[in-house]
Amino acid sequence: MFWIQALVILACIMIGARKSGVAMGFAGGVGLFILVFIFGLRPASPPVNVLLIIIAVSSMAACLQVAGGLDLLVHLAEKLLRRNPNRITFMAPIVTFLFTVFTGTSYVALAVYPVICEVALEAKIRVERPMSIALIASQHGISASPVSASTAALLAVLAAQGVSLGQIMLVLVPAIFLGIMIGAVSVYKKGLELENDPEFKKLIESGEITLGKGASREYKPTKEALISVTLFALGVASIVLLGSVKSLMPHWMINGKDTYLSIPNAIEIIAFFTSFLIVFACGLKPSNIAKSSVFSAGITGVIAIFGIAWMTDTFFLAHKAMIIDNLGGIVREFPILFAVMIFVMSALLLSQGATTRSIMPLGVSLGLPLGSLVAFAPAVNGLFFFPATGSAISAITFDRSGTTKIGSYVLNHSFQLPGFVTCISSIFIGLVISYFVF
């Protein structure tokens, strides 16, 4: 029964990933139905805290978008990139990484890709170099963001083990940033120079591409945009502070025991409080928030995690003892195999949050060191392996030079090298840092 049930789960994951979006969650529901009603497994508890955190922080980010805060951030990014055109291969990933860390969503990177292309062309740098590592940096920024779905899922799993948000950030932010810089080095001289690229030459000769000095778009930040960015930044800072310093949390005496407000609940409260402040201060229409692309992406993530995580939790709950007996010794002896498992699952699920919530509880059950589990978090960014995500396709489309592309064998695409280098580097640097943090 174990292997039949495992095949059912794998089939649901692959079908859901192929359809993507909310269909992933629905496919998880199908798998859950089969496990419960046909195989008679007892369903696990739904991952409620993770879902509530994602809803709360997605609402906060959506308010930022509707108030014009994301447009302001993109404008600042454009100014920074145009000021340093010859360093675009390093500056582009820094920008997409920081924006994703700040907002908790890689959505903002989509608006930066056209700028990266234009600045690279102006500097006569092969666009594939900055574009490929910029996409990888935006994906990894999810794991380093205190307000992302992936971090919410990781925190929900590890908070019960005494791990704080501050410890997670102390390991992942520097580890992933350094990993991204190493990834940028790996593509710094990748491919032919533009003037030697035959395909690019054809585009120039045909007149499809003309090189010239571009101009920054006319933009004047509104008062609402400035207010929303300021309030959002204060909200994020409050989440990090309270999640790192337990003594700042409200606490009560319950049955003679000093009980503190949980970190997930603190995040949810602060996110909603900040959202209201932005709505009130910027005069936003609530209907526009619900229609925003950031809010839509957040709710899509909620549904995907709801179905997939509930299905996998039910499977692991039923076979927990057997999995620990068979995998425990091997994984404890070679912990890096668990990181490989995470990577493979993320490549199939195409969701950092769903992967984290589905796999990380297994790592706790197997008795892996908490520091190692945090260091393995960058492995959830295996989304680049199959170039089927909307972000990858957008990055390829925005590159007018045609240098960022999917190879003739599909898997030999522009994102493989920086993706693997960044992921592996981040994990090993994270393991070193976690030794001192945990």
Image (spheres, helix red, strand yellow):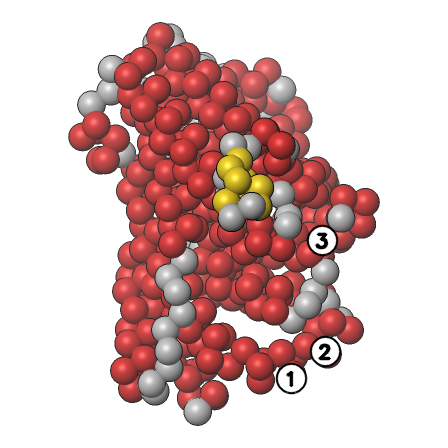
Name the residue carrying label 1: 326
The residue depicted at 37 percent of the width and 15 percent of the height is: 225
- Asked if the residue at tag 2 contacts the one at tag 1, i.e. Cβ–Cβ closer than 8 Å, the answer is yes
Mark 3: few/some/many CA within 10 Å (<14, 14-19, 20+)? many
Mark 3 or mark 2, whichever is nearer to me: 3
Locate residue 6, reporting x and y percent.
45, 82
Mark 1: few/some/many CA within 10 Å (<14, 14-19, 20+)? few
The residue depicted at 48 percent of the width and 64 percent of the height is: 358
Locate residue 152, reporting x and y percent.
49, 46
Cα–Cα span, label 1 and label 2? 8 Å
Q: Which mark is residue 330?
A: 2
Name the residue carrying label 3: 371
Image-based side of 185 in relation to 293, left or right: right
Cα–Cα span, label 3 and label 2? 18 Å
The residue depicted at 65 percent of the width and 71 percent of the height is: 366
Locate residue 412, reporting x and y percent.
56, 60
Q: Looking at this view, is 108 or 241 the one in front?
A: 241
Locate residue 408, reporting x and y percent.
50, 63
Quadrant, the N terminus = bottom left
Looking at the rendered structure, the kind of residue marked 3 is Gly
Cα–Cα span, label 1 and label 3? 23 Å
Residue 180, located in which quarter of the rendered image? top right
